Amino acid sequence: MPPKMASVRFTVTPTKMDDLGGVSDSSPDLSSSSRVRFSSRDSVRDGSRTDVYSDSSLATTGVEPTSERTSNPMDSGEDRSQTSVTEENSKLLEIDRRKNSALYQNHNEEGEDSYDRNLALFEEEMDTRPKVSSLLNRLANYTNLPQGAKEHEEESEGKKKPTKATRMGTVMGVYLPCLQNIFGVILFLRLPWVVGTAGVLHSFCIVFACCCCTMLTAISMSAIATNGVVPAGGSYFMISRALGPEFGGAVGLCFYLGTTFATAMYILGAIEIFLVYIAPEAVIFKAEGAVENSAAMLNNMRVYGTIFLILMSVIVFVGVRYVNKLASLFLACVVLSILAIYAGALKSAFAPPEFPVCLLGNRTLSRLRFNTCAKTVHKDNMTLVSDLWNLFCHPAGHLNATCDEYFFHNNVTEIRGIPGMTSDILSENLWSNYLQKGEIIEKASLPSSEVVGSLSHDYVLADITTSFTLLVGIFFPSVTGIMAGSNRSGDLKDAQKSIPIGTILAILTTSLVYLSNVILFGACIDGVVLRDKFGDAVKGTLVVGALSWPSPWVIVIGSFFSTCGAGLQSLTGAPRLLQAIAKDGIIPFLRVFGHGKSNGEPTWALLLTAGIAELGILIASLDLVAPILSMFFLMCYLFVNLACGLQTLLRSPNWRPRFQYYHWTLSFLGMALCLALMFISSWYYALISMVIAGMIYKYIEYQGAEKEWGDGIRGLSLSAARFALLRLEEGPPHTKNWRPQLLVLVKLDSDLHVSQPHLLSFASQLKAGKGLTLVGSVLIGDYLENYAEALAAEQALKQLMEQERVKGFCQVVVAQKKKEGLSHLIQSCGLGGMRHNTVIMGWPSGWRQSEDSQAWKTFITIVRVTTTARLALLVAKNVSLFPGSREILAEGHIDVWWIVHDGGMLMLLPFLLKQHKVWRKCKMRIFTVAQMEDNSIQMKKDLATFLYHLRIQAEVEVVEMHDSDISAYTYERTLMMEQRSQMLRQMRLSKTDREREAQLVKDRNSMLRLTSVGSDDDDDTDAAPTRVHMTWTKDKHHAVRVARTNAMPSFQELLSMRPDQSNVRRMHTAVKLNEVIVNKSHDAKLVLLNMPGPPRNTQGDENYMEFLEVLTEGLERVLLVRGGGTEVITIYS
């Protein structure tokens, strides 16, 4: 006789028991010597419990009257007096407790982690889906996060280098390095000449256009750099990761060539300062005459440039640390030189420096070979000829000598080369004065005879033909260097904050300096001196030095050292950029340059860089090298703007820059400005650089691939579609590119209407991430007979998709079984790389009341199929309450309950929803659960850091769930669930089913198969049952009687059954989680939480449905989320 069980009162929402054939909705009241009455969720405590164990147990005979959980209002009038449990049940529960405690102790002795009773629903998947607390424990430093980019896999394998102890801030890490890289040789050697040649107005336009170009590029670069963690690599890393390896490789090589030619430009500038202004006597090649002297100077530049390049290469090869140590000295030289210019300009307002300029008529004379600006000199009452007379007259030294005709008809005058700020020289310098090569520099305001005379004398001549476009190409290198901050991102405390602020401030500072210097030069220095590129009219003095205070040597020495420093920086950075490109392996013939010394120094890349820089030095002209590197830098900046603009327009889910002050119009404006400056400065250089970039792009794109040609526009479209699908098929998408590609499973009624149209509305709201949407449904029957009905169903789906503004495709499958049809949809939908990665379906509402068990069995089958296929699954419960696409929710919250980590779907989905106007006003809240052993304060900090680097704004809250005893409510609800499941299991066995079961006894020789619930043989209720003809024997008759006896236990045995302890644990998790979720999120507009996986044993499928019901009880809109097992969100750019 089984032990009698105490009567129990339930206060949960009752199931409709009309379907159970007269069975009451509560446990029957059996006569017993003692009764137990539990109010709703009264807890049964184990007073002698010493260990926290996973499996639930009930022990002791005392039950405290005070409920630890909030009672249901229905229980308010119930008696809360202390009760006792029957002696028989107490013994049984005590035995269970001891067994479970022993199991737990053995579990710990084996060294395994014990499952937390509060997360028992997820215990079978803890090996693949860790607890949030376990994940956050590894987030003390955000670089230890699960890496989304393949290039950082070595970090997760323990190969990461130890991080530096000191990290730089905005000023030291970004602002000052950008200043040092932007200010350079052009400011000191060419800006005065640009102002004198183009005039103040044109010069201002040139400088302003170049500064606008870099500012717009910096805005785009800031957006890219703050869209995740950017490892060192600068523009190459940002572009290649934003636009792919083809653009990245092409632009990376352009940037490399630009940096390499910048090395040549800086070396040529340093040599020019050295040979012209510091040590003119050090020239090796000398020549008489202007043309011959110019050629000799080019040879001097080549020789000294090669020597300087060799010395710099040796310094870089020996050790970069020496370059870094000298960086501060070089920066100080730049700053002091600029301050000296401003000081000299202010001083010129009241005490202009003495730099006289000698003019013959209106022609400027070179004072390198004479001192006195006069035709004759008076000495001891005698008139003597001057050195100037001897230059123009022959024979020299005679007053009656034959002189040059222009010299004879014009007077010699001496003017101030720097009249000062208070003069009106600015009005003369406003307008342009472009010259042809060999043309004499003249001062238009002075009188001059119309006689031409000989042009072979010591006049100051234009060395090159100038134009507005040429000056743009020469000046633009002076605004490059804005990538210095992004190249140092690994050394910054907060790169996402420092890079935008430091870079933009540096550009604003340098732009202000350039624009103010344009005005200062035009207001202080005479035009003929400005147009004198090498300072011949002021005895070989550097023009900027002539203005500076206290001495011209401040500018000369400062500009020399700063130019040498900039050359060293370029020679250091270019090989590392080439090494990064080579290590990526996207250009096979460059792989040899990925190797270097044992410490990682790029030796081979340094040799190649020095060789290319030597080509620039052999050109030997600063004015010819500058436009070349302008092309490469402009090409790089163009693609930075393109990358930002495309990412903004495509609205990729991973595009969440922390820098918010960007817009796609600014990016495309910057791109257009870069393109315009390229063709303005030199159209043939622009074409050459674009051809080079295009060839590299095509080489990377089509390496080893067959070229496909189509015919006409349609053929081109088909070829492009085929190419895109094949590219997507080459491998799984990168984490950054992951977006939900949806397969929406909908149910059609007899009139081919969708029973849950709000499911499509929700799918359209998720498509702010712009991905693939497939809508699928299943018709029961034969395809040959139902073909027309399938077409009609597809048309109905298309119409509904148009109404809900869902852009995608629909597919209707005809199958004999619904489960098979849905499985085929999940397996076969999509084409190539355009396949779904996420399945959306509605919750099977009313599954308890339905006589047909196929609804919830089909649901669990879909869960298992999606898990096997590694697809994400979204289950919308109460989907009819979800807002339509035309509704706009008022301010509220989207609550995320992050219980286990399964790839980041819970983080990504609310972000995508908030992109849609329906959910835009809602704020995001993230809750996670802390157990007894977790540090909730540290968890909250780590979670906030994690969200910060994900660029997701959300409130963070850690909910503490302390270990507590299994409540009586939990125990009773589990018991009721199992009793109901057993009853329904027996009642659903129809006569035909039992006959089939009996026949299987002989076939499989297993009596246990008769009580199986999860087999595929009992799910044919959708199809018409077939009659089974059986031949009866005595053995068969006995087997059937035994089967029926085992399948239909007595009612007494049913009531005396004890709930399975694993079910009690799972029910405890569901009840506890539901309590805290309802408490925190009862007023949320939407609740997202992890969906536990189905049990591995199919016997517990119906219990699994009950657990999910309990977990989501009392919530209005719920989205159960189950990840596909892959990371879908990353902190990296």
Image (cartoon, rainbow, N blue to C red):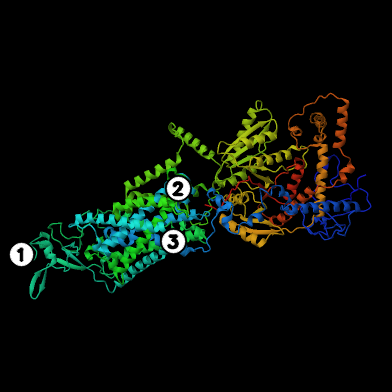
Is 452 displayed left or right of 584 in the figure? left
Q: x%, y% of residue 583?
A: 47, 48
Is 676 displayed left or right of 985 in the figure? left
> Which residue is tagged 3?
321
Label 3 packing within 10 angstroms: few (<14), some (14-19), many (20+): few
For residue 891, say whether it is visible. Answer: no
Amino acid type, label 2? Ala
Classify mark 3: helix, strand or loop.
helix
Counting the numbered discs, the total is 3
Is 49 displayed left or right of 608 in the figure? right
Q: x%, y% of residue 1013?
A: 78, 37
Is 737 displayed left or right of 426 in the figure? right
Q: Earlier in the sequence, mark 3 or mark 1?
A: 3
Which of 856 and 736 lies nearest the eye of the viewer?
Answer: 736
Q: x%, y% of residue 544?
A: 29, 65
Q: Residue furthest front?
A: 598
Q: State the CA–CA distance, disc 3 to disc 1.
A: 68 Å
Q: State the CA–CA distance, disc 2 to disc 1.
A: 74 Å
> Which residue is tagged 1?
400
Pair 2/3: label in front = 3
In which quadrant of the rendered view does residue 357 lie?
Answer: bottom left
Q: x%, y% of residue 704?
A: 46, 37
- Mark number displayed over residue 582: 2
Q: In the image, what residue occupies the spot 82% across and 41% down?
A: 982
Pair 2/1: label in front = 2
Amino acid type, label 3? Arg
Label 2 packing within 10 angstroms: few (<14), some (14-19), many (20+): many
Classify mark 1: helix, strand or loop.
loop
The quarter of the rendered structure image containing the N terminus is top right
